[in-house]
Amino acid sequence: MTSAGTPSSLPHRSYVSRRWPTSLLSVPHQLSPIWRRLSLMQAMKWAGLSSSSSLRRSGLPSEAIRQICLWHDRRNHANPYHNKAHTAQVICAAGLLADQAGIGRQERDVLLVAALIHDFKHLGRWRSRAPYWQEQVSVTKAFALLMKAGIDRRLLPKLTDMVLATSPAHDRVVSPRSDEVGALLLDADLFASLFLPEPLVRRLTATVKFEDRLALSLDDMLTYFLDKCRAHGFASHAGAALYAALPPAQRVL
């Protein structure tokens, strides 16, 4: 274990941020078995989550955050794509983007909590095609724990905006309540699919296709996803800057 309390196979965040983009390949991707050993709370701390006392001053209940992390840990890889590994990847990406954006401690904590809950209790399949249906489920179930633990309710609208904006139905326009911090979550949610060599992107796309039982072929689905990303671009300046720094061979857009 490192002094930061994370497995030695996960590089220190400051190293990854400082050596970007050459350090990218040292960060485990969603298909790596490291995410089975890493707890979500470890991922949150790696990404820069504040201490319990600092969280309390910011109105974020550390006990509820711990409970949500434990739920993800127990579920592990129950879903093909929207599982613990994906959530950990989004959390870590959010931490890296926060470093690039230079946001404050409290804003980082809100961002990491949004990353933690954005797919909370995701079914791994769609029971409804209504826009934002799954995101509303995640928000409702996570908020029940956060409110019971005493979250500052003034944070709830911002967290809601951020989570709903990760929906495929969303046009990636961030609401004023979420601003740049919300934009960082949108880009973090794409991290595992865009900042990887194309063969891995295809494998991840295949798991989404299996999970949602979509009729589209793998090639059609990947083309649709990439075309949508090209049309909207990155939501944050930090995401655009990190992507632009990648060598051409590592870009899929």
Image (spheres, rainbow, N blue to C red):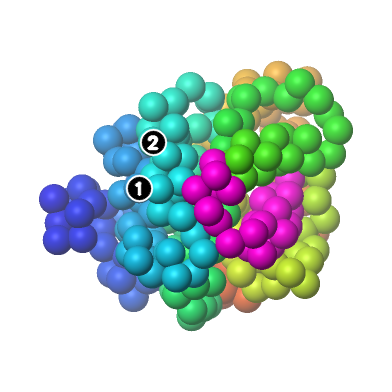
> Majority secondary structure of the magenta segment?
helix
Residue 66's spot in the image, x, y percent? 39, 45
Residue 184's spot in the image, x, y percent? 60, 65
Q: Which mark is residue 124?
A: none
Residue 138: name its quadrant: top right
CB atoms of marks 1 and 2 within 8 Å: yes
Residue 160 is inside the magenta segment: yes
- Residue at numbered disc 1: 41
Q: Is residue 85 visible?
A: no
Task: Decide: few, some or many residues near mark 2? Use Cα within 10 Å; few <14, some 14-19, many ≥20.
Answer: some
- Residue at numbered disc 2: 70
Residue 238's spot in the image, x, y percent? 57, 73
Question: Callout 2: helix, strand or loop?
Answer: helix
Residue 204: name its quadrant: top right
Q: Which amino acid does label 1 sit on?
A: Met
Q: What residue type is labelled 2?
A: Leu
Residue placed at 35% from the left, 47% from the top?
A: 41
Residue 236: name its quadrant: bottom right
**Left or right: where does residue 192 sit relative to residue 156?**
left
Question: Disc 1 to disc 2, how far (Cα)?
Answer: 8 Å
